[in-house]
Image (cartoon, rainbow, N blue to C red):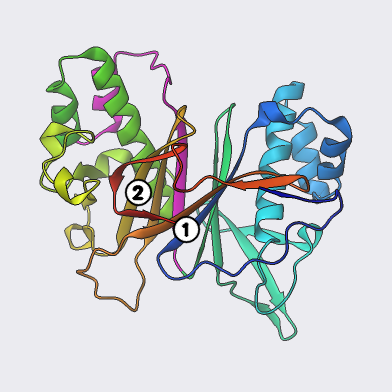
């Protein structure tokens, strides 16, 4: 665990992730009690971000919004980009045509694409930011005990593919069915976010998430467990040629209370037909105070997908 003096400096600059490598940083909102620290975080935000935070109804929602923007800024500022040390206050962002936030990077010659890609996900109890280099990324975090107000199968028929609905229908135990639904939702959210299109542009019904060679038995009972966690694949009904060649998935339990999914674009320099594991590094943080690497501990438990922790 690393501790820091409270200033606008975060940890010493880290190396950018390597190809097929994801760094996942997360915060637990309930752990942030210091008003002075939260005020310090507010100083990092742009005027527009401050306005958005203060527009939230209630202190808890304001705190979550503040922590989400702080996590993004301080996470990106940990890395040297184009050999430059980054001040978290100086970062600028833009949105793509579908609304996905992206880093707007400026060099001495003007604006240029940043090699660093990021994505954020949050629940009321945990906020996470995933980082890759030159690979699109989508992440999603869901509480394991997430309650589904509607009947699960009725809800799934509205949003899931026919194959996924059939899979859920075959599960007789209602609690296992609920857990499988949440895992599927988490993976589908991560995929849509990696595409950068958003839910409206990539409806959940237009693709199927499944376990390679073992879908019918579910995520925890796949046929290929002897070789480690089962591989996750996506099949698109709109674009059959875009099956799994371009994407790699990882699904895991995080701090025993959440499901987390990472979807990232495969390294363009590798064989499209090869399945290369996602190298995953997970760290819990209180920005400006302390960081803790939890990869390889019982706080990160792989469920499905090719994951290699370091």
Q: Is residue 302 left or right of residue 218?
A: right
Relative to 286, residue 157 above or below: above
Q: Quadrant of residue 274?
A: bottom left
Q: Is residue 132 left or right of residue 247?
A: right
Distance of mark 2 from mark 1, alpha carbons? 10 Å
Q: Quadrant of residue 13?
A: bottom right
Q: Write the residue at 86% across / 43% down.
A: 40
**Residue that numbered label 1 is attached to:** 22
The residues colored magenta run 135-161
Q: Quadrant of residue 31?
A: top right
Q: Is residue 269 left or right of residue 45?
A: left
Residue 200 in view here: no
Q: Write the residue at 71% across / 75% down.
A: 106
Q: Is 228 one of the magenta-colored residues?
A: no
* Residue 210, image x, y percentages: 20, 43
Work out which quarter of the rendered image holds the C terminus and state it: bottom left
* Residue 282, image x, y percentages: 52, 49
Q: Write the residue at 35% across / 75% down.
A: 268
**Residue that numbered label 2 is attached to:** 250
Give me the disc on residue 84: none
Count of numbered labels shown in the rendering: 2
Which of these two is toward me, 170 or 236? 170
Q: Residues within 10 Å of mark 2 (few under 14, many from 20)?
A: many
* Residue 266, image x, y percentages: 34, 66
- Give the mark, 2 or 1, whose residue is nearer the N terminus: 1
Q: Is 151 one of the magenta-colored residues?
A: yes
Relative to 150, residue 243 above or below: below
Secondary structure beneath dot 2 equals strand
Residue 280 in view here: yes
Q: Are marks 2 and 1 in contact (CB under 8 Å)?
A: yes
Secondary structure beneath dot 1 equals strand
């Amino acid at each position: 665990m690393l501790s820091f003096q409270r200033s606008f400096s975060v940890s010493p600059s880290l190396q950018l992730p390597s190809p097929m490598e994801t760094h996942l940083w997360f915060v637990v909102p309930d752990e942030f009690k210091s008003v002075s620290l939260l005020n310090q975080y507010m100083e990092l935000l742009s005027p527009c971000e401050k306005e958005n935070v203060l527009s939230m109804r209630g202190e808890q929602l304001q705190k979550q919004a503040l922590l989400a923007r702080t996590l993004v800024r301080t996470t990106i500022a940990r890395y040297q980009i184009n050999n430059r040390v980054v001040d978290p206050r100086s970062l600028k962002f833009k949105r793509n045509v579908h609304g996905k936030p992206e880093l707007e990077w400026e060099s001495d010659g003007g604006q240029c694409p940043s090699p660093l890609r990021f994505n954020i996900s949050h629940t009321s109890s945990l906020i996470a930011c995933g980082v890759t280099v030159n690979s699109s990324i989508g992440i999603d975090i869901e509480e394991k005990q997430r309650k589904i107000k509607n009947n699960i199968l009725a809800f799934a028929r509205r949003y899931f593919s026919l194959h996924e609905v059939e899979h859920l229908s075959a599960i007789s135990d209602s609690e296992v069915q609920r857990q499988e639904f949440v895992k599927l939702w988490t993976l589908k959210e991560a995929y849509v976010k990696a595409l950068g299109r958003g839910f409206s542009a990539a409806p959940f019904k237009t693709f199927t998430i499944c376990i390679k060679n073992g879908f019918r038995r579910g995520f925890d009972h796949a046929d290929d467990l002897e070789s480690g966690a089962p591989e996750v694949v996506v099949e698109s009904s709109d674009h059959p040629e875009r099956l799994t060649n371009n994407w790699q998935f990882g699904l895991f339990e995080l701090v025993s209370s959440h499901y987390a999914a990472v979807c990232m674009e495969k390294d363009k320099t590798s064989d499209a037909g090869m399945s290369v594991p996602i190298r995953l590094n997970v760290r819990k943080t209180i920005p400006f105070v302390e960081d803790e690497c939890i990869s390889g501990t019982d706080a990160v438990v792989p469920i499905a997908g090719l994951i290699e922790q370091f």
